[in-house]
Image (cartoon, rainbow, N blue to C red):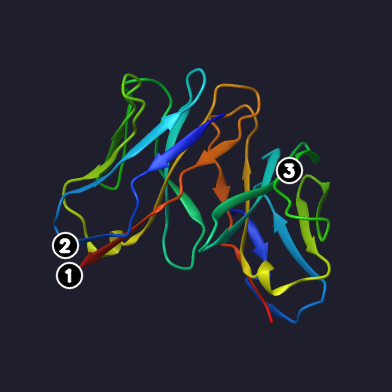
């Protein structure tokens, strides 16, 4: 079945540091890939997405590129801010009929001033 | 536009009591999902509906849990009787079936069972 593997956290960075959160997946067909972010006390919200190979999703300075050859969708940001402190979830939805999201376990990011 | 609306935001109850969580999906969305989030188990899909019909309830932990969707704009998740291990944040999410699969989440209902 489909699965998503994220790098384990927690991740702690200083403000303005470079961020990478690794995500790899297993799926049949051509899934769509997502990064969701959960700020403290809130629900998950979509950060960015990519629906086909080599697509790059971007939002709020975050980027991720759909790499089919390595089955990866790593999240990157060149300069993190304290306000980026949150839990980040990688997810996929397969191209089958179920259209059900499969989530990774989440990575807690803390950015220190 | 209104997002997914959940109530109550916080619920504290005693073991054995019935708990009902409510969700109003985004208008026009025809898929609805209930998730549970805990520190130990992360985010778990409990059940989802397409066009008000339950499609997969394999994530419902046991018979104490039940979910209904009587119409396109309302769903409930009921726990009866509640137990301390049910303490968690319960999220409702909706999406447009046939779309890209993007889910829109509510802010969650934090349940504490004493």
Percent x, y for residue A88? 39, 51
Percent x, y for residue B82? 77, 71
The quarter of the picture where residue A54 lies is: top left
Left or right for A27, reference A107: right
Percent x, y for residue A55? 33, 24
Residue carrying label 2: A15
Q: Are marks 2 and 1 in contact (CB under 8 Å)?
A: yes
Front tag of 2 and 3: 3
Number of callouts: 3
At a point 48% along the width and 68% down the height, the residue shown is A41
The quarter of the picture where residue B85 lies is: bottom right
Image quarter hosting the N terminus of chain A: top right
Chain that bears disc 2: A
Residue carrying label 3: B58
Q: Is residue A83 above or below residue B13?
A: above
Task: Examine the rendering and report whether any part of residue B1 can be seen.
Answer: no
């Amino acid at each position: 079945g489909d699965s998503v593997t994220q790098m384990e956290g927690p991740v702690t960075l200083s403000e303005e540091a470079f961020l990478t959160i690794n995500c790899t997946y297993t799926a049949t067909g051509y899934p769509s890939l997502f990064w969701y972010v959960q700020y403290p006390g809130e629900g998950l919200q979509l950060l960015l997405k990519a629906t086909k190979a080599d697509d790059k999703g971007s939002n709020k300075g975050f980027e991720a590129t759909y790499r089919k050859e390595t089955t990866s969708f790593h999240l990157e940001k060149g300069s993190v801010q304290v306000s980026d402190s949150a839990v980040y979830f990688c997810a996929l939805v397969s191209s089958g009929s179920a259209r059900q999201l499969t989530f990774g376990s989440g990575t807690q990011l803390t950015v220190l001033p | 536009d209104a997002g997914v609306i959940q109530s109550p935001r916080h619920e504290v109850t005693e073991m054995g009591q019935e708990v009902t969580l409510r969700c109003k999906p985004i208008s026009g969305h025809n898929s609805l999902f209930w998730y549970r989030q805990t520190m130990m188990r992360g985010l778990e899909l409990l059940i989802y509906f397409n066009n008000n019909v339950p499609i997969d309830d394999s994530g419902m932990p046991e018979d104490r849990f039940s979910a209904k969707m009587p119409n396109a704009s309302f769903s409930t998740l009921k726990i009866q009787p509640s137990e301390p291990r049910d303490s968690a944040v319960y999220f409702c999410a909706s999406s447009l079936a046939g779309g890209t699969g993007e889910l829109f989440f509510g802010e969650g209902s934090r349940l504490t069972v004493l």
